[in-house]
Image (spheres, rainbow, N blue to C red):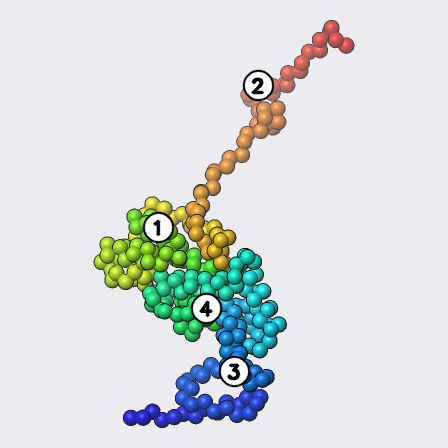
Amino acid sequence: MERLAIVHPDETPLGTMLVKNPGPDPGLTLVHIPDGDFDRHIGWLQHQLTLKRLGCSSEPLTVSHESEAAMEERVFQLYAIPRTTSLARAVAQIIEDMEAVLAHLYFLPASTGMDSSVYPNMLLLAVKNFQADFNKTRHEKHHLPVTGGLTPATYRTASTKVVNFRKELELLGFPCSGDPIRNVTAFSSTIRAFQRSRGLVPNGALDPSTRADLAQAPHPLRSAPIRTMPDAHQPCGVPSKPHRVAPLAHHTTPAPPAHKRMTPPHHENKGKGPEPQPVRARADPRHP
């Protein structure tokens, strides 16, 4: 049976727009194009939308060179991108890394075939689900914004989780060669080997069952917290070298020198003989 068309009127500054079958949440963003040539500006608007979804602006999209330049400068600062690096390549690398991270954490399929030059809606939904899932076990003041947009905090939090899971697997005897975020296939193979050893579904992703099994697996260093050191060569400082914190040494207060020790009061020395007097050095008569 043919689906009935649902026409949704939407009032805009330029008049009433009719949208056919918009769904429960159209999520429409209107951008004013002064010359009316949409085809000429579509690539430009996609680039600005990608930068906006990377947390570079909260302002509405506009066909403006000034706004685009400001967002490009902002992405260099937010993600600590070296000035010698191509912005397009750096943005694509951030998106590729986030896709790999979310695939490892079971928020995206292993292979999406997405174009890394843009920030697609599939990635937007996956990031939003990760942010909501992360906030379930965190205090409100440590919550991530559940927007689907990629901020440095979201990027760093998700990447750190993958790096720490890799460390957990290594401690259990399942090493992974190379960076787990850049070497997706190698790390997926490591996860798959662990899953087979535990009788789990070997899907190569850190799904809830695998994460729960890792949390219960005993190893001698589990009690020591893991801290990660940022790597300046990776965007947004993806931690790549976990360091364990050494326990604090027990410090004792040294005893004061003998000449500064306090003698007990007279009432405590009663019945124990005269209180000892300090020995004075005798002057040498040969020297005045």
- The number of numbered discs placed on residues in the rendered structure image is 4
Image coords of residue 267 (percent x, y): 59, 27
Rendered image quadrant of residue 7: bottom left
Q: Nearer the viewer, residue 82 or 197?
A: 82
Q: Nearer the viewer, residue 231 or 216?
A: 231
Image coords of residue 145 (percent x, y): 49, 68
Q: Nearer the viewer, residue 268 or 105?
A: 105
Mark 2 or mark 1, earlier in chain: 1
Of circles 2 and 3, the one toward us is 3
Q: Are marks 4 and 2 in contact (CB under 8 Å)?
A: no
Which residue carries the number 3 mark?
Answer: 38
Dot 3: element: helix
Mark 3 or mark 4, earlier in chain: 3
What is the spatial separation of the Cα atoms under label 3 and label 1, in whole angstroms?
47 Å
Please give the label number shown on residue 22: none
Which residue carries the number 4 mark?
Answer: 117
Disc 4 residue crowd, few under 14, some 14–19, many 20+, Cα 10 Å = some
Image coords of residue 123 (percent x, y): 42, 70
Horizontally, residue 279 falls left or right of residue 176, namely: right
Which residue carries the number 1 mark?
Answer: 177
Q: Amino acid at mark 3?
A: Phe
Of circles 2 and 1, the one toward us is 1
Q: Residue at horizontal 41%, vertical 70%? A: 115
Disc 3 residue crowd, few under 14, some 14–19, many 20+, Cα 10 Å = few
